[in-house]
Image: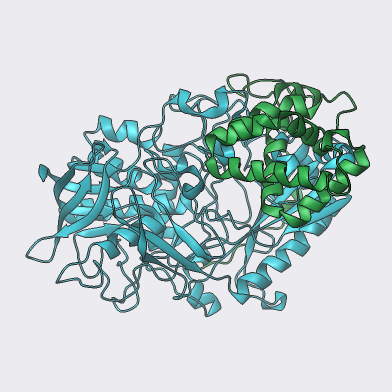
Chain colours: A green, B cyan
Amino acid sequence: MSRERLLAKRSLLIAVLDTLIPTGEGFPESGALALDHVVAIADASAQDGALLSHALDAIDAAARRDGTRAFERLSVAEREDALRRVESSDLQAFDVLVRHAYDGFYSHPATTTRLGLEPGPVQPRGHRIEPAALPDLTRVAGRGPIYRQA
Amino acid sequence: MANDDRSDVLVIGAGAAGAAVAWRLASAGIGVVCLEQGDWVKPHDYPHWQADWELHRHTDWSAEPNVRGLPQDYPVNDQASAISPLMYNAVGGSTIHWSAHFPRFRPSDFRVRSLDGVADDWPVDYATLEPYFDLNDRMMGVAGMTGDPAYPPKSARQTPPIPLDTLGVTIAGGFEKLGWHWWPSDSAILTRDYDGRRACVNCGPCDLGCPIGAKASTDITYWPKALASGARLITRARVREITVGPDGLADGAIYYDRDGRERAQKARAVVLAANGVGTPRLLLNSRSARFPEGLANRSGLVGRNLMFHPYAMVRGIFDRPLGGHRGPIGCSIISQEFYETDLSRGFVRGYSFQVARGLSPIASANGGSVGDRVPWGREHRRAYAERFDRTITVAIIGEDLPEAHNRIELDPALVDSNGIPAPRVSYTLSENSRRMLDHGIARAGEALQAAGARQVSFNPLLRAGGWHLMGTARMGTDPATSVVDGEGRCHDVPNLYVVDGSVMVTSAGVNPTSTIQAVALYVADQMIRRRS
C-alpha cells in the first residue's frame, strides 16, 4: 500500500530527493539513484513506508501553503524552505526520509565510483594496503611498564 | 515431550565462551552436547558479496536484535537503559559480528578492591589465567606485536599486526607528539594464513561478519575442533529453562527445537554460556519450588550488577584522504595512557582509546557513531566532501563499575516467539563513568588535534554500544555476594556452571572477549580436574 502511495507521488519524490542531495561535481542525480531504494523500503517496512508517505504529504502541503504551486515547480530556495518547515513540524517522518535518501544514494555504485571507491561488493576483492615498515615504538617501549603489579 | 540422550555436559550457547568450553571438555574425552538457538552462518550468507552491503548494517545484519528481528533472535526491552545491548544469535554468537579487538584485562583489573577500594577483587588473577590467554590466542589467532609496556610480557603473536595504513600512522603521530602510550592493537584477525585459515584482505566491515574466515569467530576456530573431538551441537534449539532433579542439582534443560517442539536434554552437568543478558534471563526463568526466585539466585544477585562498557566517540576531520575504508573496521591502535587510577583526574579506574578505521559512504552521510548527519540541501555536497575519507574516530572505552541497580529482569509482558519471557534491561550511567568519559573526550580531542585534525566532534555516550554484557552472575568466594565461585560453579547448584561475561566481577577498560574465553577455558580445566 505504501509503495503504491509513494509511486503515485513519484515526481514529487524525485524532486525531493534531488533537493536533499543536489547533483553536481560529477555526482549523478539523487532522484534517479535513490528512488528505487526508497520505494523498496516502503515494501520492506510498513512503518517506514507510512512515515515516508506522511513526509511526502507534508512536503506537498508545505509547498502549496502560500499558493497552488507543486513542489516540483518551486525554485531551489523555495523547495528548501518547504523542506525546512516539514523538518520542524514532522521530524520523525522527515528523518526517515533523509536517512533512506542517503542510504539509497550512497550505496549506489554510480555514487561510490564517483567517491573513488571500486564499485560493487567488497568481497572477494578487498582492499590493497601498501606494505610498510612496522611503526617505530622505541619511545613508547622505552617508558617501561605502565601497568600496575597486582 | 521428547527426551534426548543424557550427556555428560550440556553447554547452552555456542558463542565465544560456549565454544571454548565445549572444545576443551570434548578434547578431554567428556561427552558434550551444546544447544544453540541460532544457526550456522554460511560464508555466502554474509552481505559482503553484494554491492549494497552497507545497507545491511541497519537491517538484517544490525548488531541490535530488536532491529534485526531474525527468527532466532529474542526481543530485549531496553527502554529503561541508556545503552542498548548488542548480540548475535548463531553458532559463533557475537563473535560473528564483533570487530575482534582483542586486548586482555590487565593484572590490576583482577584486584580492583585491593588497589582502588571500589568494586571487588576477582577470585582468580592474571597469573592464573595467563596460560589460558595464551591457549586462547593460539586457538583464535591473534595479529599483534609483543613488547607493549601496558602489559606483562606476552607470548609471540600468531601473525604480524594489522597494518596501520595512512589513518593509523596519522593518529599515532598525535599520540607521539603528546608523549602518550599507543600500540598496534591485538586483533583476532589474521594478517597471514594460519591454522588452515586465510589472511585478511582488508575489505573493511568486520562488524558484518567475515566471509573468508580471516576474522576469528568461534564457528570457524573452536567449533570444527570441538566437533572433531566428539562434541555434539544442536542448532535452532532455544532453551526455556534449566531443570533440577530431586537432589537439587541441575539435570538438564527444556528447549524448543527448530520445529517448535518441546524437548528435554538431560545432562550430569550444565554450563551456561548465553551471554550477560541471556544467562540471567535463563536462570530467572528457571524457577521451581526449591528456587522460587530463579535458579542459583539465593543471593538475589542474578541479573544484578550489569556492566556495559560505556563508549564515547570522538571524531576528527582532516584535510587529506586517510584511506579509512581499507582494513578491519575496529582495529588499528590502542592507547592505555589513562588506564590506571589517578584520582586527580576526578574519577576512579580508567579507560582505553580504541582507534577504528574511517567511515564508509553511508556512515559518512549519517554521521557514523558520532551521529551528526551531513546537512541536506545546497550545503550537502561540500559538507560531505569535507568528511568522506577524511575522518578518524577514537572510541573511549570506559571501565564500568558494578552497581546493583543496573540489572536484567524478566519482562512481565514481552515474550519471544516461543513464549519465553524477554529480558528487561535497567541501566543508568554512573557519575564516575560520566566523569571518566568526559575526561576521555577531552584527551581524545587533544590527540586528534595533535595529529592534525581541524575539527573535532563527539558523541558523549553511544547508545547502540552495548557490545559487552557483563557482571550479571558474578564470581566470588562469598555466596552472599556472588553467584558463582572462583571455578565458575554456582554456589547454590554445584553442577551448574557459568562461563560467559556474566561472571565478570569488574569490567576493565578494554574489550572483554579475550578474558571471557580465558576464564571459560580455566573453568573447563577445573571441571576436568574435578572429574578425574
Instruction: Reply above or below: A115 against B179.
Output: above
Relative placement, left or right, of B515 versus B55 is left
Instruction: Reply above or below: A129 against B222.
Output: above
Q: In which quarter of the image is residue A28?
A: top right
Relative placement, left or right, of B509 versus B489 is right
Q: Which of B209 and B521 is in front in this view?
A: B209
Using the rendered image of the protein, determine whether residue A134 is visible from the camera's viewpoint: no
Using the rendered image of the protein, determine whether residue B388 is visible from the camera's viewpoint: yes
Q: In which quarter of the image is residue B297?
A: bottom left
Instruction: Reply above or below: A81 against A26.
Output: below
Could you tell me residue B50's position as x and y percent? Answer: 58, 23
Instruction: Reply above or below: B149 against A3.
Output: below
Residue at the extreme front of the image, as rendered: A68
Could you tell me residue B273's position as x and y percent? Answer: 33, 52
Q: Which of B338 and B179 is in front in this view?
A: B338
Q: Nearer the viewer, residue B11 or B141?
A: B11
Q: Nearer the viewer, residue B391 or B67?
A: B67
Could you tell me residue B373's position as x and y percent? Answer: 76, 47
Q: Which corner quadrant holds the N terminus of chain A?
A: top right
Relative placement, left or right, of B456 versus B198 is right
Total numbered labels: 0
* Residue positioned 61% across, 70% down in the render: B433
Relative placement, left or right, of B317 versus B431 is right
Could you tell me residue A56's position as x and y percent? Answer: 71, 41
